[in-house]
Image: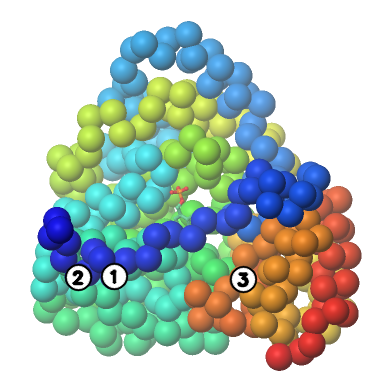
Amino acid sequence: MFDVPPYIADLVPYPPGKPIEELEREYGIKNPIKLASNENPLGPSPKAVEAAARVLSKLHRYPDGSGYYLKQKISEKLGVRPEQLVLGNGSNELIDFLIRVYVRPGHEVISSDPSFLVYRKMVQIAGGANVVIPLKDYRHDLEAMAEAVTDRTRLIFLDNPNNPAATVISRKNLDEMLQRLPRHVMVVLDGAYEEFVRDPDCPLGFEYAGRHPGVVALRTFSKSYGLAGLRVGYGIMAPEIASMLDRVRQPFNVNSVALAAAEAALDDTKHLEETLRLTWDGLDMLSGELEKAGFATMPGHTNFMLVDTGRDARAVYEAMLRKGVIVRAMGSYGFPRHIRITVGLPEENRMFLQAFREAMRDLPPA
Ligand SMILES: Cc1ncc(COP(=O)(O)O)c(C=O)c1O
């Protein structure tokens, strides 16, 4: 048969959250709610939808391969220069670019366990070695990560906030780590959920990337901007790094509908504010109710939270599915008793709580 190296054959396809249509088909459930993939329950900004629709009659044209206008908008908003920006087909693609440019067989990449699974997968594809440091009290253990650095280390991935624990690092701890690191190590601050953070002591990636030549910040339009289906993300970095990533980028990696929608979404500050208010209210309500019922939750610095069900999370997931609520069981992230739930609309949060209470009544504690 065709030859495949063992490090590719060993990969496990990414387990996406169950699509709503599948639940309707398989379980015969009408109008299930999906709280599994950290999406924006309000939907996209109506302005982004209008902008996307305007592009549809021009789909015979290739997109602007440089993303000129979107980069202008981002640079004005964040106070960085356009040449510090690289756009991607989701921030996932930026992770791919970084690893393709900087990681070769024999190189090491440090990340936390658990953290966003895509880092490790891409490193494996590149034939690099993953050095995985367990979270300490659900937080990145920056000291242990710095200690794990060797001559072969090229990148350190920090999802801040962390997915799935939803915890954040502090400026002080990050500053201390950056001071310790040798110059050949790049730190990637993945801020996919940064807009949701309420803690003023949490370092924001774009501020660091502007100042530190060895820090790359990632951001996405998939979460707070509600454009997950269009796949747009970006990275902020030193121009020299951006120019390297640009060399491996496909010429039209971000499509024209995505570019137009992302630009409009950035302008729609009202939609972002509504999203944040809805998320924070939902987090506070859900954690309050769950704690009252005796279930430990993690402080949510994101639009999702971990809940310790005290039971086999897979069974909880199945029981919730039958009640029409899709959550995520976290066994594959090393939390066999936890589920991860994304904040939904207020009525979805209430439906979740009711289904959860019923499931807990029916299932034996682990
Ligand atoms: C921590 C983290 N980083 C990056 C991403 C990728 O987001 P996207 O490729 O949709 O921009 C996700 C998505 O779930 C995430 O949780």
Q: What element carries label 3?
A: strand
Q: Which residue, given by chain and number where applicable, does mark 1 sit on?
A: 10
Q: Do the residues labelled 2 and 1 touch (CB within 8 Å)?
A: yes
Amino acid type at circle 2 is: Pro
Q: Residue at x 11, y 73 (%)?
A: 106
Q: Which residue is drawn at 87% across and 80% down?
A: 361
Towards the viewer: 196 or 287: 287
Q: What element carries label 1?
A: loop
* Snapshot quadrant of residue 111: bottom left
- Residue 203 percent across, percent down from the top left: 47, 64
- Distance between mark 3 and mark 2 Cα atoms: 28 Å
Labelled disc at residue 173 = none
Q: Which residue reaches farthest front?
A: 1
Q: Which residue, given by chain and number where applicable, does mark 3 sit on?
A: 329
Amino acid type at circle 3 is: Ala
Q: Image quadrant for the C terminus?
A: bottom right
Amino acid type at circle 1 is: Asp
Any part of residue 239 in sight: no
- Distance between mark 1 and mark 3 Cα atoms: 22 Å
Q: Which residue is drawn at 40% across and 48% down?
A: 91
- Residue 143 percent across, percent down from the top left: 36, 85
* Snapshot quadrant of residue 300: bottom right
How many marks the image carries: the answer is 3
Towards the viewer: 268 or 153: 153
Q: Which residue, given by chain and number where applicable, does mark 2 sit on?
A: 6
Towards the viewer: 100 or 140: 100
- Front: mark 3 or 2: 2
Q: Residue at x 46, y 75 (%)?
A: 114
Of labels 1 and 3, earlier in sequence is 1
Q: Is residue 236 left or right of residue 290?
A: left
